[in-house]
Image (spheres, rainbow, N blue to C red):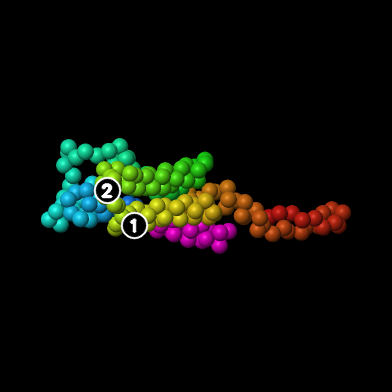
Amino acid sequence: MVCGQRCSLCSRFFLFLFLGGGIALSIMCIWSCSFLDSGVLGASQSGVGLYRYVDDTGTCVVYSDDFPFTNSDQTARVCGLIAPIIAAGAGLLGLIQLFCCNLCCDRCFISCFFTSAQIAQALTFFMFNGTFCTVGFGCSLSLGSYYSIGAWGSYFLASVILCFSPKPDPLCCKKKDDEEEMQQEYTSPVIEPDEDGLHRAVAE
């Protein structure tokens, strides 16, 4: 029992480690000025991010409100924004499971959050199907893309740990029934003779 709880807590430590790393990489992907390299914005090969880009002077600036984004661009931008939010929701449910109580089908709910975060993070690559990768201008992976790949991989590893690791007992809600069962299990019998001289085991 003790080893099982320790293994569960150890697996949860790595789960939250990968989850936190994935959220950090997702935020870095959003803030990056170079999700991909393209020549659409004037320079021979300038950095293009989800919400910022590198202009002709080499300065990282925010897109103007009237910038002609395509549907693919907007999908990538929105999904890049909601991926860490969904992952944070998975982390919140994981903390509730770890500290408070084990809810019915909580592992399935957390897995759905992880899967949604992975899908949203993967959809950031719709940027390669948008305005900046038109005919005549080649696009290549840049730093923000590698952040996105790392975030997706972190969410995937966290979901694998969730599915294949044992569920820990809540740290703040110990069940009295389990303690009573343990006491009954280790109760030693007392042998007392009866009126006929036979010995019978009587539990203390």
Of pointers 1 and 2, the one earlier in the residue sequence: 2
Disc 2 crowd rating (10 Å Cα; few below 14, some 14-19, many 20+) is few
Q: Which residue is mark 2?
A: 136
On the image, the x and y values in percent for residue 99 come to 43, 50
Residue located farthest toward the right when viewing the structure as drawn:
196
Q: Is residue 75 left or right of residue 158?
A: left
On the image, the x and y values in percent for residue 125 come to 35, 48
Residue located farthest toward the front when viewing the structure as drawn:
136
Instruction: Report the front residue among 89 and 176.
Output: 89
Is 110 colored magenta in this rendering? no
Instruction: Report the front residue among 156 and 41.
Output: 41
Q: Which residues are magenta?
A: 1-18
Q: Is residue 182 left or right of residue 85?
A: right
Q: Which residue is mark 1?
A: 146
Asked whether residue 33 appears in the rendered view, the answer is: no
Query: Could you tell me which residue is drawn at 40 percent across and 58 percent down?
Result: 17
- Amino acid under disc 2: Gly
- Taking 80 as reference, is 158 above or below it? below
Tell me the SS state at disc 1: helix
Disc 1 crowd rating (10 Å Cα; few below 14, some 14-19, many 20+) is some
Instruction: Report the front residue among 32 and 157.
Output: 32
Q: Is residue 47 left or right of residue 107?
A: left
- Amino acid under disc 1: Tyr
